[in-house]
Amino acid sequence: GQQLNQSPQSMFIQEGEDVSMNCTSSSIFNTWLWYKQDPGEGPVLLIALYKAGELTSNGRLTAQFGITRKDSFLNISASIPSDVGIYFCAGGGGNKLTFGTGTQLKVEL
Amino acid sequence: KAGVTQTPRYLIKTRGQQVTLSCSPISGHRSVSWYQQTPGQGLQFLFEYFSETQRNKGNFPGRFSGRQFSNSRSEMNVSTLELGDSALYLCASSLEGGLLNTEAFFGQGTRLTVV
């Protein structure tokens, strides 16, 4: 099945650092969603984007819907240990979500 | 407001058997989607139901089927289980889904192991 290109695949950062990850696609999407998944749990919605060019924040998280509608990025500022987990982007269109390959974030104290 | 509830959380089945998984969406949500998550393939879309009708289907064999009831609860069934069906099965609910693509909220998933 199709998956979106998400990078980086994994990141190992120091507590307090800023983090950036992005997602690209060859297809256009109507919405972009960002999720975080902890081991053994379902993905939890972090941010939803509905318009090309839209920039949305949720606490320390900021995400943007690319102007071409084929990409999105997520920034996390001042990372903390509980930010550890796998982050997924998802493009919405045609009654379904297409997910990225995931970015595993590890935070060093 | 209760979240998306999936039952059971864990399941062990033998090859050749069939299995039924259940999903209760958030109250008021009419769209229910199912996804399979494996380490190798990531999150893959199975199908989406809205008002008891399947609106979209992913690229899975006919052994995978689903249905939605009038109260929006959904079930998915896998027949003639194969070892490769071992995965975390996730259900997501949203208000309308479809072209509006409102936020989708996931349940905790059902971990299916086929032995």
Image: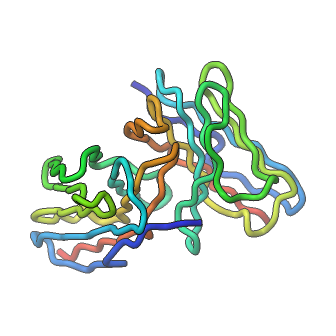
Locate the N terminus of chain B by quadrant. Answer: top left
Q: Is residue A4 above or below residue A8?
A: above
- From the viewer's perspective, is B78 left or right of A15? right
Query: Which residue does the image show at 35% across and 65% down from the upper left?
Result: A85
- From the viewer's perspective, is B100 left or right of B55? left
Query: Which residue does the image show at 22% across and 65% down from the upper left?
Result: A81
- From the viewer's perspective, is A84 left or right of A101? left
Which of the 4 image quadrants contains residue A26?
bottom left
- From the viewer's perspective, is B32 left or right of A10? right
Q: Is residue A32 above or below residue A105?
A: above
Q: Is residue A51 above or below residue A66?
A: above
What colour scheme governs how the chains and residues are painted in the rendered image of this protein?
rainbow
Q: Nearer the viewer, residue B11 or A78?
A: A78
Locate the C terminus of chain B by quadrant. Answer: bottom right
Which of the 4 image quadrants contains residue B45?
bottom right
Residue A16 at x, y percent in the picture: 10, 69
Query: Which residue does the image show at 62% across and 28% down from the upper left?
Result: B73
Residue A14 at x, y percent in the picture: 15, 77
Q: Nearer the viewer, residue A107 or A37?
A: A37
Q: Nearer the viewer, residue A106 or A72?
A: A72
Residue A65 at x, y percent in the picture: 24, 55
How many numbered callouts? 0
